[in-house]
Amino acid sequence: MSAALELACQAAGEWIEGLDTRSVAATATLPDLRRTFGGPLPGDGQSAEEVIRTLARDAAAGMHGNAGGRFFAWVFGGGLESALAADWLVATWDQNAALYSASPASAVIEEVAGEWIKELLDLPLDASFAFTSGCQMAHVTSLAAARVGLLERFQWNVEDNGLFGAPEFRVLASDQRHITIDRALRLLGIGRNALEILQTDNDGRVPVAVLDRALSGDTRPTILVLNAADLNIGACDPFRELIPLAHSAGAWVHIDGAFGLFARASRTYRNRLDGVELADSWATDAHKWLNVPFDCGIAIVRDRAAHRTAMTSSASYVAPTSVARDQTDWNPEYSRRARGIPVYAALRELGRSGVEALVDRCCMHCLDMVEGIGGLPGAEILARPTLNQGLVRFGRPGASPQENDAFTNETIQKINETGEVFFSGTTWRNRRAMRISVVNARTTERDVKRAIAAAAAVLTRDVLERPSN
């Protein structure tokens, strides 16, 4: 076993050290990977050492370098050194972090990490929390609490009676919501048809007048979902105006803050989220801006009783405690990793000032990249970042919008094929764009310059190769 572990540690070190020089995009094709890893189930086993040696060697070409500083697709954080090392320990200790009795240290460390997160984000200190697999399950956890809390007002016990015969829900969410909201409603039995879409303004925010009209005269149990940084342009809804309006109509307000909630840690950017603390529940990801390894989401709920009612369960073989915190009272899992330990390690490594510096640095790098690439010939800026997300589009003079949609997709692919950098595409306001997302603690000014240079080289080559009229 020690030989295999030593090989894994060596391979991990080589992977991290090579992030700056290796292609950011995976280079192996689907047929390559199926040929390498496929075949019938082995009849006889191999040594652990040989398994790890071949796995590390053969998988590398099929892995993106998203742990490094030049990956700007989607919203993937890297891995802080302490958080990554702590995650290795989590796997080694192999604890089921569901109950204090099953892993005392895991329960206490997670308890402390949750309290620190609320303090860092300046959210109600008496709120409950849960570490989940990601923001998808953080939404499910939070909205399950909302389902309990809202239906109690209608004298309906949803935990005992389910939703058959219950008052009909409606869920107000913006046209810029994340798809995980839709899936959370499906998983909770509320359903997509409960969604009522709120049209956002040119800045991607829900206007007060739009919400006021949607709330008017409807007495059904209502959930309002607002964005603390949408995935395309980092737009944050006007919480200070919208949340009291929703509360006056009896609505539960849930915040999708998958990455943007961490802007609360920055004195420069926290004003973008003014009033977000007034909500009833919040969801975010530690594996985004906090840079802990996948997977780790966080749900925070103001109504502790509704949260616990929605999640807790018991059985004769379970050994609950009335003194310590049992994680399963707040999470939708009985078998779970000790996700709070890497969070605890990251917060110990960074401290409040380190998280603030990380947020500020990412926002600065995003702005520099959007302006640098958007200023190139053949490029235009669709949305400057208000936080750490921005959009750039590519086009040719005289081309139709559809042709420039295709050209944008082609340009993104060509940039990624350089291996210097990796971006993803999106559709915003019916136009294709390249999304620039910066949340990695490893991103530097040099990485930004390399990204701009890669885009410039692709656009220059396109001009040279374009046939003359």
Image (cartoon, rainbow, N blue to C red):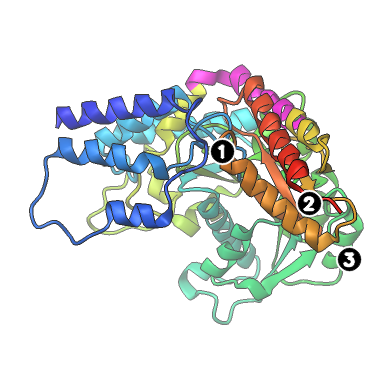
Whichever of labels 3 and 2 marks the residue nearer the N terminus, that label is 3
Whichever of labels 1 and 3 marks the residue nearer the N terminus, that label is 3
Q: Three-letter amino acid code at disc 2?
A: Pro
In this rendered view, identify the residue nearer to me: 290 or 242.
290
**Above or below: residue 33 compared with residue 383:** below
In this rendered view, identify the residue nearer to me: 308 or 299.
299
Residue that mark 2 sits on:
467
Answer left or right for 434 relative to 12. right
The prevailing secondary structure element of the residues shown in magenta is helix
Residue 161 location (% of width, % of height): 49, 75
State the SS at label 2: loop
Q: Nearer the viewer, mark 2 or mark 1?
A: 2
Residue that mark 3 sits on:
213
Residue 232 location (% of width, % of height): 72, 48
Residue 241 location (% of width, % of height): 86, 47
Answer left or right for 222 relative to 314. right
Chain part drawn in magenta: 348-367
Q: CA distance from mark 3 to mark 2?
A: 53 Å
- Quadrant, the N terminus: top left
Residue that mark 1 sits on:
288
**Above or below: residue 304 compared with residue 170:** above
